[in-house]
Amino acid sequence: MSFFSAQGISAGYGADDIIKDISFSVEAGQLTGILGANGSGKTTLLKAICGILPHSGSCTLKGEGLEELSPKKLARRCSYIPQRSGISIDISALDVVLMGFNPRLGLLESPDSAMISAARQALTRVGLTGMENTNYLHLSEGQKQLCILARTLAADSSLLLLDEPESALDFRLRHRMLHTIRSWLAEADRCGIVTLHDPSLALNFCDRLLLLSGGVLTGCIRPGEDDLDKMEAMLETIYGELSLLRCKNRSGQEQLVMLKEGRI
């Protein structure tokens, strides 16, 4: 049995399905990426998995059906990072991270000292050391994304869902974020599913890539195993004519580079 599996997921807004009959699985420790053109259903799929959108089909995590769980239990097992946090009030970065513990707390119960310590450690892990008391609204957009990531890491859920978490980050921080996520997934029984704005990041950090087109799953790429010709042909259905190259950086680490070919 797979660590996480989605079977026949269909969902949308109103009477129209945006995604249709999507099935896939993810093993423990893996990071699975979702690639697709704008409007292909990437965000809709993440929202269906975490229960924000009603859907048909089923999701199973560690043998447990997610649709059968109460919202509070589901929130303890599955963490979702949207493209925008929705936070618009004056609140410290530390208090934002402590929100990750809400599913574990009772009514009017406050985080204990262990939770506060874990929240501080999470901020340090994402590179926000010393910013615990900074007003969240005063952070840059990139720092806000890192703060929300820290909240998710502190929550310690088994399934991590991220919707373009790198979109407001610079080159250095994009790589740092993905390294942090991968190391966090490897520390315990966890897996992650991520949509990425930058396909080059997806090719170099994800174990598998699911390709969506028109709300339908059209293929799967394994960057570490598949040959370049196969990956080029599949990616061209999304991005048009392109070339993939395997290069090595100065330390000898191999990386995939994607180049646009033809007319833009």
Image (cartoon, rainbow, N blue to C red):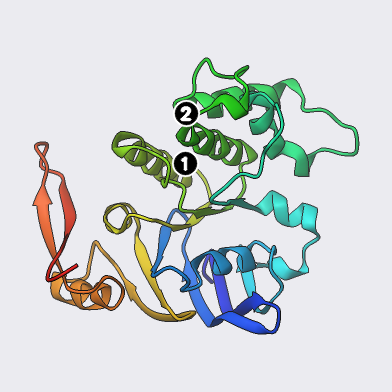
Q: Which residue corresponds to mark 1? A: 184
Q: Secondary structure at mark 2?
A: helix
Please say if 129 is above or below 3: above
Q: Is residue 234 above or below residue 192?
A: below
The answer to whether 147 is drawn above or below residue 190 in the figure is: above
Q: Secondary structure at mark 1?
A: helix
Q: Nearer the viewer, residue 149 or 154?
A: 149
Q: Is residue 31 visible?
A: yes
> Which quadrant of the structure image shows residue 96?
top right
Where residue 197 appears, x then y in whole percent?
38, 56
Q: Are marks 1 and 2 in contact (CB under 8 Å)?
A: yes
Q: Quadrant of residue 238?
A: bottom left
* Tag 2 residue: 125
Q: Give the crowd class for mark 1: few <14, some 14-19, many >=20 residues within 10 Å.
A: some
Task: Quarter of the image for the N terminus: give it.
Answer: bottom right
Please tell me whether mark 1 or mark 2 is closer to you in this view. 2
Q: Position of residue 104 (x, y in %)?
A: 77, 41
Report the front residue among 138 and 229: 138
**Kind of residue at disc 2:** Arg
Q: Residue 236: image x %, image y %?
A: 23, 75
Q: Is residue 35 left or right of residue 253?
A: right
Q: Tag on residue 89?
A: none
N-terminal of the pair, mark 1 or mark 2, is 2
Residue shown at 40% from the left, 61% from the top? 33
Q: Nearer the viewer, residue 61 or 96?
A: 96
Q: In screen coordinates, is 116 left or right of 152? A: right
